[in-house]
Image: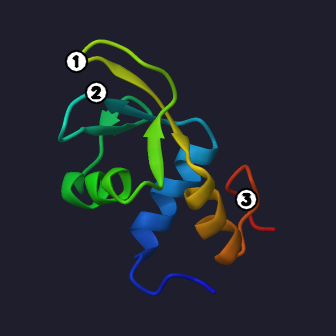
């Protein structure tokens, strides 16, 4: 079942993450970047990180931008919404 609390924008961030287009800054309130640009809805993007749907793909220094990855839960949310592992329609 699709999570009714996630917006189309949240699903778009998850899909972009699955495609390798998202980076996060390493901090307690991470900033999220898509294609090198700061995402316009930082509170919404941070909520995805705090909810455990997106995480840093590797460790780094505080404040450093690193690639983001979907967690198993994030992949499940995309699958429930009808998207495959690469964020494309299944």
* 13 or 78: nearer the viewer: 78
- Among the two numbered marks 3 and 1 on one chain, the one whose residue lies closer to the N terminus: 1
Residue 55 quadrant: top left
Q: Kindly report the distance in space between the C-alpha atoms of the residues bearing marks 2 and 3.
A: 27 Å
Pointer 2 with pointer 1, Cβ within 8 A: yes
Question: Circle 3 — which element?
Answer: loop
Residue 63: x, y in percent? 21, 20
Residue in the image at 81% along x and 68% along y: 90
**What residue is shown with label 3?**
88
Residue in the image at 43% along x and 54% along y: 52
Residue 58: x, y in percent? 49, 22
Residue 14 vs 24, above or below: the answer is below
- Among the two numbered marks 2 and 3 on one chain, the one whose residue lies closer to the N terminus: 2
**What residue is shown with label 2?**
26
Q: Kindly report the distance in space between the C-alpha atoms of the residues bearing marks 2 and 1.
A: 5 Å
Q: Which mark is residue 62?
A: 1
* 20 or 64: nearer the viewer: 64
Residue 32 quadrant: top left
Crowdedness near tag 2: few (<14), some (14–19) or many (≥20) residues, C-alpha within 10 Å: many
Residue in the image at 28% along x and 27% along y: 26
24 displayed left or right of 40: right
- Among the two numbered marks 2 and 1 on one chain, the one whose residue lies closer to the N terminus: 2
Q: Kindly report the distance in space between the C-alpha atoms of the residues bearing marks 3 and 1.
A: 32 Å
Residue 89 vs 85, above or below: the answer is below
């Amino acid at each position: 079942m699709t999570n009714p609390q996630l917006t189309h924008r949240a699903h778009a961030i998850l899909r972009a993450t699955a495609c390798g287009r998202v980076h996060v800054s390493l901090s307690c309130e991470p900033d999220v970047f898509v294609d090198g640009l700061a995402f316009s809805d930082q509170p919404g993007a941070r909520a995805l990180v705090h909810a455990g749907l997106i995480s840093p793909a590797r460790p780094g220094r505080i404040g450093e931008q690193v690639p983001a990855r979907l967690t198993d839960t994030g992949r499940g949310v995309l699958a429930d919404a009808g998207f495959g592992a690469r964020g494309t329609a299944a």
